[in-house]
Amino acid sequence: MPKLPFSRAEYDARLTKTRNEMARRGLDALFVTDPSNMAWLTGYDGWSFYVHQGVLLTLEGKPIWWGRAMDAVGAGLTTYMTAENIRGYDDTYVQNPDKHPMEDLAHLIREQGAETFSIGLELDNYYFTAAAYLTLQQSLGCATFKDATGLVNWQRAVKSDTEIEYMRRAARIVEHMHGVIRARAEPGMRKNDLIADIYHAAISGAEGHWGDYPAIVPMAPSGMDATAPHLTWDDSPLRAGESTFFEIAGAYKRYQCPQSRTLFLGKPPQKYLDAEKAVLDAISAGLEQAKPGNMCEDIAHAFNQTLDKHGFKKDSRCGYAIGLSYPPDWGERTMSFRTGDKSVLEPGMSFHFMPALWLEDGGLEITEPIVITQTGAECLCTTPRALVIKE
Amino acid sequence: MPKLPFSRAEYDARLTKTRNEMARRGLDALFVTDPSNMAWLTGYDGWSFYVHQGVLLTLEGKPIWWGRAMDAVGAGLTTYMTAENIRGYDDTYVQNPDKHPMEDLAHLIREQGAETFSIGLELDNYYFTAAAYLTLQQSLGCATFKDATGLVNWQRAVKSDTEIEYMRRAARIVEHMHGVIRARAEPGMRKNDLIADIYHAAISGAEGHWGDYPAIVPMAPSGMDATAPHLTWDDSPLRAGESTFFEIAGAYKRYQCPQSRTLFLGKPPQKYLDAEKAVLDAISAGLEQAKPGNMCEDIAHAFNQTLDKHGFKKDSRCGYAIGLSYPPDWGERTMSFRTGDKSVLEPGMSFHFMPALWLEDGGLEITEPIVITQTGAECLCTTPRALVIKE
């Protein structure tokens, strides 16, 4: 039997929650392609999301894993499913312009007697392409397809105790990664050598817990490059008088704990210290609003109003839900801390409070992964909340 | 000015090749969402493909980068494009169920006078979702959309001298990574500690060249887990009497050089040695067919026939095109070494010859990245082609 990361009871509860929402939306079936949703529902874990695959769930019976034949073995090794509910398609369907794997899925759906069902699809999810949709539509003329983007993601919003424990382990790992940056970074060091050390810390893990791969690689731009949020690295040396932000995550059993800090080598100019003070005050103001019953936008408003008072502006969202994730995003793609997001906070929800500033001549990222508690919010990490200054 | 990885002349030649193919297919415009294609055409580099973005190319004029407003800065820093051809959409479009970024792209297409054009879309590409397509269709009722999946990928098939040089640097890196495995692996070592060392080698680089992130994380299953191709790692210790395959890649400036080797700790049973001999003979037979004028399937046939003679079988393709890549795949998604693929080999084409065997009780991967030369094929790596046995 596979060593599943959660109890069967927890998977059963997840299936029940998901089916309740399917029924509420009038869906007879749901085809789940988001690797995070596949893993959350079944335990499936493998880097096979570069080919078409998914989990087919109807209102009753067992879920069916469907994917490339060679990956059916991995489904047997990582899920609670047994052979009769694991279905592989022939390798000739793989990246072959002459045929599409969704033709095979259509057969399976017909075989299940589901060809006239109302079927939910994750229309705006990575790895569910336009061609996948068009092929299903063409192959199953009698089915009704409905958009179910985010349906499963929303069921994942409130974390179980075990999930939070995994995120705490990931938190220990990202703290360790930031410790390595503080210890090793110095002027003249090639950026990629520092990134190599960060990766080593990420995968070695912390406090005896092994590190899984983060869903995003380290983003670590310096100086003017740090005016852009998503650049990675090269071999340019770290320089005195320059800032570098490190947007990184620890991961444990696919649970992600992202946290960013900004390093300044040398004595920072006053404007950096002003920006730091603004962000720290704004984080405190945001955290005060992070409590059950408040809405996501309450955090954004408190954050932005405090930032405004200090004379800084941020146009983009300042946080998003986190948890189980696969590349290319460590966010859950449900709630965001921004005006208009009226999602109500509940205990067990987890977020990356991500109040990054990208200024005209550099970036400042000081961020906190948080979990909503019964009365407020808990920061998962103890990394010192400040600019990292090495003079 | 950004430090581009290629000369402007090389980018211009790429645009010309792509436009010639667009014209041949009757396309007035092409919207490119594959991050590898975006980078190949413009230089754009950043981990921003978790939001909707792309490059809009018409038959004349300059290409336009389009994406999230905060990433427009990165486009300015990593491409040859200037501000008037870099267009960012408002952050409220990001992961917001109430609106879709493609509504903004539709505005841009209309502004360009392209709303009645025949527009090519990468319908089966990661990151071009069904919802993206449906939104464009709804927003641009007078446009004609045609499938252009792989259009740009095919232009990338024959590599330039500079591209091959980058792949050679990536080859030095993956050789170094395999050297670290040979040196460090031993019974009792936690798998994740070995992966940490592999990552460190990958990013440190080799021969003075820095390591970029591979498009797939290390896959490194042991024992029965190695009967599945795409499992990653945990903290299980390496065991005597067990095999582990390491499917890994070196990367330099996003160019990928994947190579797999299989480690056996202890004395391998005869069946492993038989499988090794079968694969090595079959690789030699395949490589003999890897030359200009032959077809991709010629390599597969030679490989499979030799494997058959030894009493082994492989159902899946045994190779695919490689080059510039972003997650989730280091393949180019054009040619495959399999029956029916009649693509004709040309000098400068590059492949991962990937004759992996997944047996009933373990896996065997001994693979070779190759470049087609004027007369045959060159293996990019000098890693010893054999089982790695540590007794």
Image: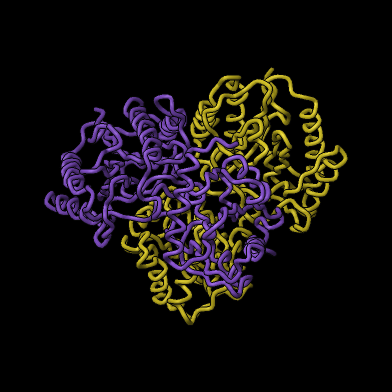
Chain colours: A purple, B yellow
Image vertical order of residue A78 relative to residue B235, above or below? below
Query: Can you give x and y, in whole percent of width and height, for residue B5 in the image?
Result: 50, 48
- Outermost residue toward the left in this view: A309
Query: Can you give x and y, in whole percent of width and height, for residue B93 in the image?
Result: 35, 63
Quarter residue A98 falls in = bottom right
How many numbered discs? 0
Left or right of A348? Residue A269 is left
Residue at 42 percent across and 65 percent down: it is A24
Is residue A21 in sight in this rendering? yes
Image quadrant occupied by the C terminus of chain A: top left
- Outermost residue toward the top in this view: B391
Residue at 38 percent across and 69 percent down: it is B104
Image quadrant occupied by the N terminus of chain A: top right
Residue at 28 percent across and 42 percent down: it is A367
Query: Can you give x and y, in whole percent of width and height, for residue B227 in the image?
Result: 68, 38
- Outermost residue toward the right in this view: B309
Left or right of B337? Residue A154 is left
Query: Can you give x and y, in whole percent of width and height, for residue A282 in the image?
Result: 18, 46
Residue at 31 percent across and 49 percent down: it is A227
Is residue A271 in sight in this rendering? no
